[in-house]
């Protein structure tokens, strides 16, 4: 890595590095444990670099995973979903910016991307998603390729867009991933040196799957297989929750012309594969899967059932009220319009009149007869009014 970084420096700088390499006995190939290889080992050259160039090499040991997952000084701002629940968990800024400084726009844009723990909610079948990890040094586009059911939850299956590993040779929009046209990496390699101290790190699918055929031709033992080497994400569309995923990447060193550096001449202009990794989640934990089945499968159906039941009940109550109102009005009209015509009421009137017989007198003139008749009718009208009122209350 140091040889690649210094290869374009002045002659005197390269001479100094060669002297240092020979004096310290540094070799490009070392025997070490897997833990040292992944999480760091100390070397004389690294110790000197850390001592004399601390602004560049601020670590005293070097390991692949140790450096790729170095998050010192990193901070992210994410959406809480307060104003738009579909954006919950998506990145707003990384280190205070909506883009990463390694690339020009639009290649450096990481606004509203997912880091893989939570994707947008309410995903439609034709939506494309964007995935960002610091280790990839860019955001990549995901496209839907299938639908499936995982842990009882409906889900969409996504792969990276076919030309997402292109550096501009096939996709014009990816040209901003190659700042020097003379040093563009072949299709299938992601140039991430800008995120790793200038070291010539390049990512690819395992066994150079989907990459330039020359990559496999120049490497012994490659056997690319999409079933075991391709990355996929299985996402529940309503919640944006990943229910199954496999992120598979191979770490390579894309070395340039380093023929002038001691002990590394044989690796000049070579893409050297180091290892490939798989980050895998097979399914949700049982308790979490049961909870999301309740939230996403059961409760929406219960909500719909209750809503329609209340709608039907409300309609029935409304119809019953209208029917009651109409029949009540009809009964009242019958009572008030026919009460004077009922036979029983007529008989009661005749009976009342028969009880009021005038006393026999020898003779009465017309004036006396009128006064006498009026005096008889006053109590009769009062009794008839009470009788009619009682009769009406009984009918009601």
Image: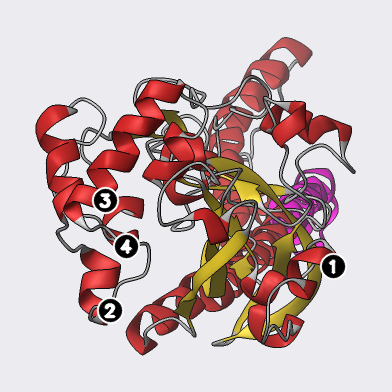
Query: Residue 213's mark?
Result: 1
Image location (x, y in percent) of residue 249? 56, 67
Most foreground residue, 305 or 292: 292
User: Between residues 314 and 134, which one lies in front from this camera angle?
Assistant: 134
Up the image or down, 334 lies above or below 48; here it is: below
CA neighbours of label 3 inside 10 A, class few (<14), some (14 to 19), many (20+): few
Q: CA distance from mark 1 to mark 3?
A: 37 Å
Q: Residue 183 at x, y = what percent?
A: 70, 35
In terms of sequence position, does the residue under pointer 3 or pointer 4 come before the other? Answer: 3
Q: Is residue 192 above or below residue 165?
A: above
Residue under numbered circle 4: 27
CA separation, marks 4 and 1? 30 Å
Q: Within 10 Å of the Cα at label 4, are there few (<14), some (14-19), or many (20+) other Cα atoms?
A: few
* Mark positioned earlier in the residue sequence (1 or 2): 2
- 315 with respect to 108 (left or right): right
Q: Are marks 4 and 1 in contact (CB under 8 Å)?
A: no
Q: Is residue 30 above or below residue 118?
A: below
Residue 31's tag is: 2
Whether residue 146 is in magenta: the answer is no
**What span is colored magenta in the figure?**
322-350
User: x, y percentage for residue 372?
Assistant: 62, 23
Mark 1 surroundings within 10 Å by alpha-carbon count, few (fewer than 14), some (14 through 19), many (20 or more): few
Whether residue 91 is visible: no
Residue 199 shows in this picture: yes
State left or right for residue 341 relative to residue 150: right
Of marks 2 and 3, the one in the foreground: 3
Which residue position holds label 3?
Answer: 22
Q: Of the residues tagged 1 and 2, which is closer to the observer? A: 2
Residue 229: quarter of image: bottom right
Q: Secondary structure at mark 1?
A: helix
Mark 3: secondary structure: helix
Q: Is residue 329 magenta?
A: yes
């Amino acid at each position: 890595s140091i040889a690649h970084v210094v290869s374009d420096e002045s002659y005197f700088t390269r001479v100094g590095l060669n002297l240092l390499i020979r004096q310290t006995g540094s070799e490009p190939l070392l025997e070490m444990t897997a833990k040292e290889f992944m999480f760091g080992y100390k070397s004389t050259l690294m110790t000197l670099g850390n001592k004399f160039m601390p602004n560049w090499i601020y670590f005293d040991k070097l390991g692949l995973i140790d450096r790729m997952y170095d998050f010192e000084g990193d901070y992210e701002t994410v959406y809480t979903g307060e104003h738009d629940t579909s954006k919950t968990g998506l990145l707003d800024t990384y280190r205070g910016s909506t883009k990463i400084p390694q690339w020009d726009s639009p290649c450096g844009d990481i606004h509203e991307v997912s880091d893989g723990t939570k994707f947008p909610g309410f995903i439609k079948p034709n939506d494309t998603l964007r995935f960002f990890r610091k280790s990839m040094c860019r955001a990549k586009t995901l496209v839907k390729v299938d639908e499936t059911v995982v842990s009882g939850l409906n889900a969409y299956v996504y792969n990276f867009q076919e030309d997402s590993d292109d550096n501009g040779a096939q996709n014009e929009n990816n040209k901003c991933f190659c700042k020097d046209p003379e040093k563009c990496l072949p299709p299938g390699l992601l140039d991430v040196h800008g995120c790793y101290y200038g070291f010539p790190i390049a990512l690819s699918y395992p066994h150079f799957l989907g990459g330039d055929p020359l990559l496999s031709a120049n490497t012994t033992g490659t056997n690319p297989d999409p079933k075991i080497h391709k990355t996929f994400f299985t996402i529940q569309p309503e919640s944006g929750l990943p229910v199954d995923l496999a992120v598979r990447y191979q770490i390579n060193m894309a070395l340039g012309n380093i023929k002038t550096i001691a002990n590394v001449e044989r690796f000049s202009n070579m893409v050297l594969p180091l290892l490939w990794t798989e980050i895998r989640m097979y399914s949700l934990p049982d308790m979490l899967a049961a909870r999301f089945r309740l939230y996403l499968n059961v409760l929406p159906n219960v909500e719909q059932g209750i809503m329609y039941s209340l709608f039907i009940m409300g309609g029935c109550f409304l119809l019953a009220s209208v029917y009651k109102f109409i029949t009540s009005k009809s009964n009242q009209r019958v009572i008030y319009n026919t009460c004077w015509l009922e036979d029983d009421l007529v008989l009661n009137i005749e009976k009342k009149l028969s009880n009021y017989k005038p006393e026999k007198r020898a003779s009465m003139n017309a004036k006396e007869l009128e006064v006498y008749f009026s005096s008889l009718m006053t109590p009769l009208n009062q009794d008839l009014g009470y009788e009619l009122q009682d009769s009406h209350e009984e009918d009601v």
